[in-house]
Image (cartoon, rainbow, N blue to C red):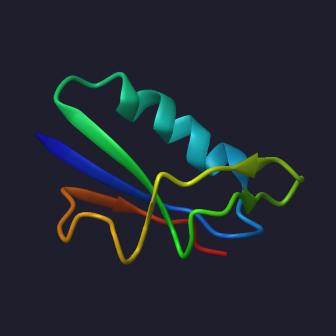
Amino acid sequence: MVTIGMILFDGMTQLDLTGPLEVFTRSPDTMVHLVSKTNNPVRCDRGLRILPDTTFANCPTTFTVLLYQVV
């Protein structure tokens, strides 16, 4: 099983998340986690809000891949 963590934060660019997310979620034996500080919606740079599915405190302790956007 491949475990992927994608870090969400206010001001991120939505396409930097959803582009790779589309590819990863179609891959067999892959689990994707949208991780943020809280479970509150994260507001992207153009206003779209994305809901994380886990927090840093509750996410898996290891990931095969960890993605974040450098600003």
Residue 10, position as x, y percentages in the image: 73, 69
Q: Is the residue 1 above or below the residue 10 in the image?
A: above
In the displayed image of the protein, which residue is found farthest to the right?
46
- Residue drawn at the location 48% of the way across and 51% of the way down: 53
On the picture, is 69 further left or further right than 14?
Answer: left
- Residue drawn at the location 28% of the way across and 25% of the way down: 27
Residue 40, position as x, y percentages in the image: 66, 63
Q: Is the residue 53 above or below the residue 66 in the image?
A: above
In the displayed image of the protein, which residue is found farthest to the left?
1
On the picture, is 26 further left or further right than 16?
Answer: left
Residue 5, position as x, y percentages in the image: 36, 57
On the picture, is 59 further left or further right than 11?
Answer: left
Q: Assign the C terminus to one quadrant of the image.
A: bottom right
- Residue drawn at the location 17% of the way across and 43% of the way down: 2
Residue 38, position as x, y percentages in the image: 57, 71
- Residue drawn at the location 38% of the way across and 29% of the way down: 25
Q: Assign the N terminus to one quadrant of the image.
A: top left
On the picture, is 2 further left or further right than 69?
Answer: left
Q: Is the residue 44 above or below the residue 56 in the image?
A: above
Number of numbered callouts drawn? 0
